Amino acid sequence: GDGVGNLFEHLGGTDPANPLSSAVPKVTLETPAGGGAPTVALEFPRNLAADGFTLTVETSTDLVHWRSGDPDLFYAGIHRDANGRAIMLWRAAPPAAPHNAPRFYRLVARGNEAGG
């Protein structure tokens, strides 16, 4: 395997037995073409047929206290990569880390409750 848990392999549409088929999130620092403050982009492959789970990104400044719903982080949608896989994209609005404080990200999968 590649060290990624089977749930994330399923949600990412990757093969847990193939270390070259990984569902590891990609994090990049992007500078706007016209200049300005850089932003953080987080991408994760998503198996659109894997129903029953919601993926969210949580943030922390100390790796102890985590929160979802960070006002500087927004879901930017889904696009397709060169292989046709669905890729979920989140962006952190500038500044990527206010006051030069560290910012950590983690991807969390939560099961959707059935019924009503």
Image (tube, rainbow, N blue to C red):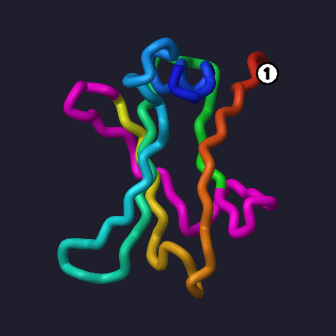
Q: Which residues are magenta?
A: 59-85
Q: Quadrant of residue 18?
A: top left
Image coords of residue 115 (percent x, y):
77, 17
Left or right: where 111 falls relative to 96: right
Residue at the image point whose x is 40% and y is 69% from the top = 39
Q: Nearer the viewer, residue 41 or 23?
A: 23
Secondary structure at badge 1 equals: loop
Badge 1 crowding class, 10 Å Cα cut-off, few under 14, some 14 to 19, many 20 or more, is few
Secondary structure mostly seen in the magenta stretch: loop
- Circle 1 sits on which residue? 116
Q: Residue 45, how many percent across, how many down?
A: 42, 32
**Vertical relation: 116 (above or below) 60:** above
Residue occupying the point 60% across, 49% down: 57
- The three-letter amino acid code for the residue at tag 1 is Gly
Residues 53 and 65: in front is 65
Q: In which image quadrant can residue 13 be found?
A: top left
